[in-house]
Image: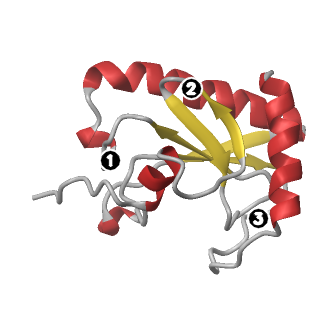
Amino acid sequence: MTASYDPNNIFAKILRGEMPCHKVYEDDVALAFMDIMPRVDSHVLVIPKVPARGLLDMPADALGPYMQRVQKVAAAVKAATGAEGLTIQQFNESAGGQVVFHIHFHILPRFEGVALRPHTGQMEKPEVLAANAKKISAVLA
């Protein structure tokens, strides 16, 4: 059995404005912001405003509009970074690699021959995150 949604998870707090983020995009459906522990430069997270723990908990009628935002942000990340490709990841439950239990997609710009950094818990400098967010936001404007 899947655990229930915890309204005090970090992403819920970000949505309520209780925790800061380096925002890339926001509308009535989704919020996109910089991952503070990026696996690659310009690593962005896209979360829905619907409180859903994972993909299987997401209301079907909300999934389509949310995925349109994931696609829109992914295109902007690719354009802003000049990436040759993208890795888009979404994890479900601990056994699937999920750490924050609010559905989210990782958008990682990729370049031939450049490996992802290991997930060490190392936080990126705020000024780097802000600069990357500004660059991607400009494409979305």
- The x, y position of residue 100, in whole percent, is 42, 61
Is 22 left, or right, of 105 in this rendering?
right
Q: What label sits on residue 30 in the rendered view?
A: none
At a point 16% along the width and 57% down the height, the residue shown is 2
Apparent side of residue 35 relative to residue 30 in the rendered image (left or right): right
Mark 3 or 1, nearer chain start: 1
> Compared to 12, does 29 lie above or below?
above
- Between disc 2 and disc 1, whose residue precedes? 1
Q: Residue at x 80, y 33 (%)?
A: 137
User: Which of 125/69 is in front?
Assistant: 125
* SS for callout 3: loop
74 in relation to 37, above or below: above
Which quarter of the rendered picture does the N terminus lie within?
bottom left
> Could you tell me the amino acid type at mark 3?
Ala
Mark in front: 3 vs 2:
2
Residues at marks 3 and 1, CA–CA distance in whole angstroms: 27 Å
Which residue is the site of mark 2?
69
At horizontal 64% and vertical 80% (from top left) the residue drawn is 120
Location of residue 67 in the rendering, given as x and y in whole percent from the top left corner:
48, 27
Q: Is residue 31 left or right of residue 54?
A: right
